[in-house]
Image: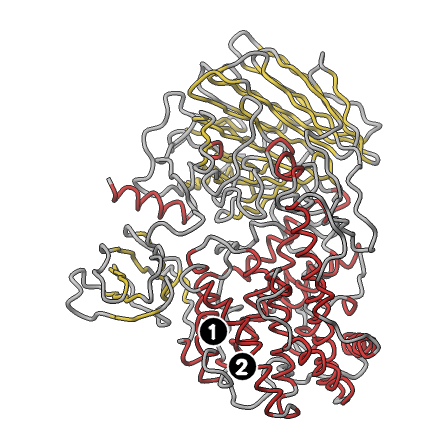
Amino acid sequence: MKKNILLFVGILCLTGCNSKPSNNNSRMEPPIASVIHPMYLNMAVPSAGIEARQNPPVLRWPKIEGCAGYEIRLSQDSTFRDDVLTASTEMAVYNPHQRIPNGNWYWQYRKKGGEFSEKYAFAVTPDAVPVVSPDAEVFISSIPKTHPRILTFDSAGSSQDDNADADEILREANDCLRLPIPKEADAYATRKLSDPSQQRKIDMDASQDLSSAVYDQVLALSQAYVLSANASFAQKAIQIAMEVSSWHADGITCLSDFGDARCMLAMALVYDTFHDMLDPSCKTKLRDAISRRADRFYLSWLNNIESKILSGHVWQHILHYFFQTAVAMQGETPNADRWLRYAYELFLARAPVLGGFDGGWVEGVSYFRMNMETMIDIPLIIQKFTGFDFINTHPWYRENIRWMIYHIPPGSSADGFGDNSEEVESPDGAYIAYAEVIARLTANPLAGWYAQQCRRYESPDLSKTKLLRWIRLAKTTGKEIPDAKPDPMLPMMAVFHDLGLASMHTRIADTPHDLAVMFKSSPFGSYGHLLCDQNVFNILYAGKRLFFRTGYKVTMDDPHRTGWYRTTKSQNGVLVDGESQPYGSEAFGWMARFMDCDEIAYVKGDATNAYKCFKPATDLGVTKMLRHIILLRDDLVLIYDELEANREVQWSWLIHSLDEMKIDTVRQTFAVALDDVMATGRVFHAGGLQWQLADTCDVSAVNWRESRDTDGQLKSYDAPQWHLKVNTSGKHHATRFLTLICVRPENRRETLQASADDKGIVRISYENWDVSAMLNSSQPPGLIVRNKSRTAAFSIYPEETALAGKKIKSTLPNASMMVYEQYGSIVVREMADSIPHAMANVLLYQKTRK
């Protein structure tokens, strides 16, 4: 039967950003950006004529140290003579808060009284997402003069009758009545260590523990009073807050910024919730104590945080605490309007600070839990007073659930990226609670499906955790979780281009039979809770860790973290002369290509820039670090690495496992058994290889902090872990690895057959697939995958690809091509390198500097 041919050409590169391909036809190379997401913004955005992603765009520029304020002008007239929008702000960011017409726009900024900057340009098209929020003054003026403002019931039909959340809050509050009033002296650590840096961490922990206890007690008592009007709860909460108001505002309780903020909010909650019960002297004392702490945050953030790639603690909790404090105190103290204006503009300008437009959280699934309430509650407070619904306006919230489905699937461990993700063995109550809240607020059936599927594997009592409990009780009661579709038709792969994350699955909706490959190559580089993990992967089967990164996060500066855990040595990545990627935002990667069909998922990461850094100055000489990963529906993973340097180096290919790994250096294989399956990998290389298998890390982990797990038990860092390093026998300017990893029932014999010719081409036959790859680095690279049933084929850099007797010529130079049958037609898809939006702006900006 004659088949139709459908052609889909995917060339997502920014026009003008690609130089001529290298002489081995492997890479359409954009000019290398020095950094995409610097620690502090170092260029104006949007600029260089780029298309704005939202309307209106948020204008941002490098902060000027010591600047008392800025002035901005914006116009479609490049001379700024006609129709000029002008504004002034204390922040190095400006949101016009009004939709602007499509077309070309020009803007400038200056410090007040100074000269305007150079002229910047951007374009607004119909594709820009409308995100039109009210002006900050509208928000501030909408806050009622009466109290309370924070702990109120916002949902129509809210009821506390027979409600597990309300019952648990009341139980906790009753327990608080029996506790002594916390004292400032309790913030001093009793443990003494000889190491000064370790002692400082112990001191910070003790300070934070006291402040957290204060906040937890006040929150439970205040919420319980709103639920019950029990005067005993009010009396105890007021006693605690008045005690805290007598503490030294610059003393031991501000040693931890989390602790400082929790003391501040605890007092603000009491001031707001029990406002009419407080006598004038109590109000004065609370106002003064709250203001000293809030002013300190405000003054340290202004002209700083808005320009910084990330201040983790601010976005995790403190901004949320500060925002609530400012709402509670608005109209009560003169500076509250300034606090509120800053917090409001900061959130709307930068959120989601680590999420981009395409969902997800680049810092990882563990630390996203610390951002959940901030990302939900601040928008709900804004909506409550203005009606503006940020959650259903910004595309991140719609795509965020897709990231959860693919990177922490129901019944599965997490993807393994970012600090503490090794401790996330399932979505647990946090992700179920978050998904249910999102489902109620957005009516997104995928969110409902995710929560429903998670409950098939675990049934946590959500009322036992404080996370999202009040939001669920007071702000979403009466909102239904939409009916979940039984089969949401999820594709094999999800890619989050802004973040540099990809997740490939053979059976995403069936965790017990799913082979998952998680891949990262991120424009954010390594910073904060991000690790040195560009072009690295983790593999899970049935939701369990098969090949997974190793180590433990003891503390941020602990020798084990800095010497192993955060380095590429602990990852399934590549070392250069035994060296890891450096730690810095300049050491970035990016997802260059990605496509999938029913049988094949493919992604290409480019980590060429990940082996360079400014501080400390590092350049390992890498000129090409490309990794292609292909997942085939028949539980087969292919990893093809193209590696080049400007000098001869030894290349090390790494893979790790939490279960015992066995190697066969004659067959060049490694294997891990997991439950009733066997995962076997084979490494192909044109030259000799040296295999090194170890079960210890370079730097041991010691729990000197005495950290505990969720069950209250001391964490143990002595579980065995296996680390395989496959080194090139000599040093080479360039080399290539092809690795095949197959997962099969343990009782089924492996059927892999492989051969290599004298040209450097290796040919592999496995199950229903034939694979050929060029490993001779003096020849142009190439990889071809084709199933034996002749229904699907994939190739890298082909001039043509054949399927079912038809030859299909490539229409894009040096692209990747996927060809497959679908509904009686042959579908052809091609893709060249695709640049993330932030990288495109950097490259265009750099082009204008020349």
Numbered mark located on residue 829 in the image: none
- The amino acid marked with disc number 2 is Met
Q: Quadrant of residue 194?
A: top right
Viewer can see residue 607: yes
Q: Nearer the viewer, residue 763 or 803?
A: 763
Labels 2 & 1 near each other (Cβ < 8 A): yes
Residue 467 position, x and y percent, is 69, 66
> What residue lies at 36% left-to-right and 65% top-to-bottom?
94
- Of the 4 image quadrants, the one containing the N terminus is top right
Q: Is residue 465 left or right of residue 133?
A: right
Q: Which residue is mark 1?
A: 339
Q: Residue furthest top?
A: 758
Q: Which residue is mark 2?
A: 329
N-term mark: 2 or 1: 2
Q: Is residue 756 left or right of residue 845?
A: right
Viewer can see residue 2: no
Judged from the image, the secondary structure of the residue bearing numbered disc 2 is helix
